[in-house]
Image (tube, rainbow, N blue to C red):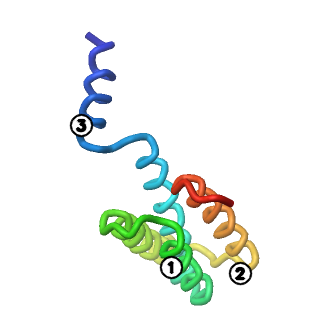
Amino acid sequence: MTKALPLLALLLAVSAGVGADDAGLERAVSELGTLNGVALACKQNALAARMREIMVDTVPKERSVGEVFEQATHASFLDFGSAGRTCPDGKSLAGEVDRAREKLRRAAGKPA
């Protein structure tokens, strides 16, 4: 019976249209959204604008993808403020954005 559960989950995922590529894209979009929330909380407006451009240039123009980005941004922004975290310097945050961009490009099947 325990072998049937993973198979059932796989069948449900396939029938719902959720594949491994979609999950990877969702994680990559969420990671960029999390960084966007930090950039906004730290008033790094140029980096936040850059992340929006990365999204527009990289991911499919679908509502669900945009919602993942916006939800991750919102959660990260609120968490950053409530946790009293210290803002990273612009250079290190930009480096994280570059790494997240590459992950997003790979997940979206875009060339480097």
- Mark 2 highlights which residue? 90
Number of marks in picture:
3
- 110 horizontally vs 81: left or right: right
- Please give the label number shown on residue 5: none
Q: Position of residue 20 (x, y in %)?
A: 44, 40
- Mark 1 highlights which residue? 52
Q: Secondary structure at mark 3?
A: helix
Which kind of residue does numbered mark 3 sit on?
Ser
Circles 3 and 2, Cβ within 8 Å, touching? The answer is no
Q: Nearer the viewer, residue 44 or 24?
A: 24
- Please give the label number shown on residue 15: 3
- Closest to the camera, between mark 1 and mark 3, is 3
Whole-angstrom CA distance, mark 3 to mark 2, is: 43 Å
Q: Position of residue 1 (x, y in %)?
A: 25, 10
The C terminus, quarter of image: bottom right
Compare marks 1 and 3 and give the one earlier in the sequence: 3
Which kind of residue does numbered mark 2 sit on?
Gly
